[in-house]
Amino acid sequence: MKGVVWVKKHRFTGFLGKFVLWLVSAFFIGVVGFPLAWMMLSSLKPATELFKIPPKVFPESFSLEWYVEAFRNANVVRYFMNSFVVASATTIIVIVMATLGAYSLTRFRYFGRKAITVATLSAYCIPPIMLMIPLYRIIVGIGLNASLFGVIIGHTTVTFPFAIWLLISFFRSIPREIEEAALVNGASDFTVFYKIILPLCVPGILSTGILVFILSWNEYLLASVLATQDTMKTLTVGLANYISSTEINWGVIMALGTATTVPVVLMFMAIQKYFVEGLTAGAVKG
């Protein structure tokens, strides 16, 4: 009888814990998701409803007038392309360098390895605003302040320490026995890295890549300083054109904010499965 009571009590405690966890998760999802939902729904409201007092969450009639007004401007399309080029180039450069650097720091033994690891973490802790003036002077000095290459260099500088620090933890999670077995069988270091370690780190590399892409896509400070020409502005910097001392075009801002969020959400959906895969599951399954 006592055993039955204990089992029921244990089940109730487990159910209560799951229910509390669900409530906490729902609360934080609501805190994060409500502003995004408000932005998306506001972008679909006509001008007569957007500024109505008291405001309503759901529009009475849906309208695409803000999207039409936003994308009628040719500069907006250019801003989108600039953001995509900068974020994509930054992601590719950072992932290639960070993957090779993280593998080197976790697998090889050489003088200064620990110092480089600590320096990487230290660089990650430096606020980007402190690098703004040195980066600006360097990029102006090499004549790249009038092109997207300057923005790419700036974004690479601030995201590379973050990426290499994340990838170090992924490489450390892979058992060394896998590499040792391949080396014993005659595989070279490059073969081990390319055909064994790299496939096992696909989830980590993709996760890091999407985070680097988001950081570059949403970055404002460096892009606003390093891109001196209007045609070189990224989307986050271009949005500032709709904010002035006398007027704020909320409808267009809501529309462009929604359009800015959609690519990131689609990328997350495309690689969602990699977030739940184990890093060494493939090696165990053989």
Image: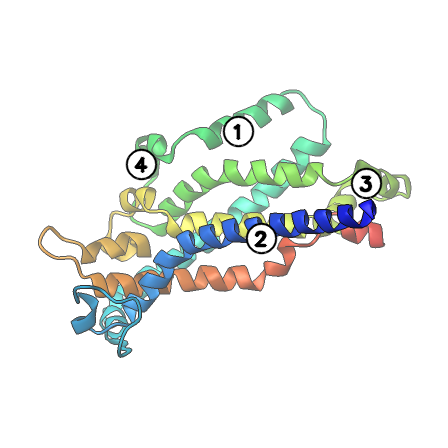
Image height of 248 relative to 123, above or below:
below
Tally the numbered discs. Answer: 4
Q: Nearer the viewer, mark 1 or mark 2?
A: 2
Task: Kindly identify which residue carries mark 1.
Answer: 121
Tag 3 or tag 1, which sits nearer the N-term?
Answer: 1
Q: Which mark is residue 67?
A: none
Q: Image quadrant of residue 139?
A: top left
The picture places residue 77, in percent across and down from the top left corner, at 31, 66
Side of 22 where 44 appears, left or right: left
Disc 4 versus disc 2: nearer the observer: 2
**Kind of residue at badge 3:** Glu
Residue 19 image label? 2
1 or 3: mark nearer the eye? 1
Quick one: label 4 or label 1, which is nearer the N terminus? 1
* C-alpha distance separating marks 1 and 2: 38 Å
**Along the line of sight, which residue is nearer the eye, 19 or 83?**
19
Contact? badges 1 and 3 (CB < 8 Å): no
> Secondary structure beneath disc 1?
helix
Q: Is residue 196 visible?
A: no
Which label lies toward us, 4 or 3?
3
Q: Secondary structure at mark 3?
A: helix
Could you tell me which residue is drawn at 72 percent across and 47 percent down? Answer: 10
From the top left corner, tell me how far across and down residue 83 is, in percent: 38, 56
Mark 3 highlights which residue? 179
Residue assigned mark 4: 136
Q: Closer to us: mark 4 or mark 1?
A: 1
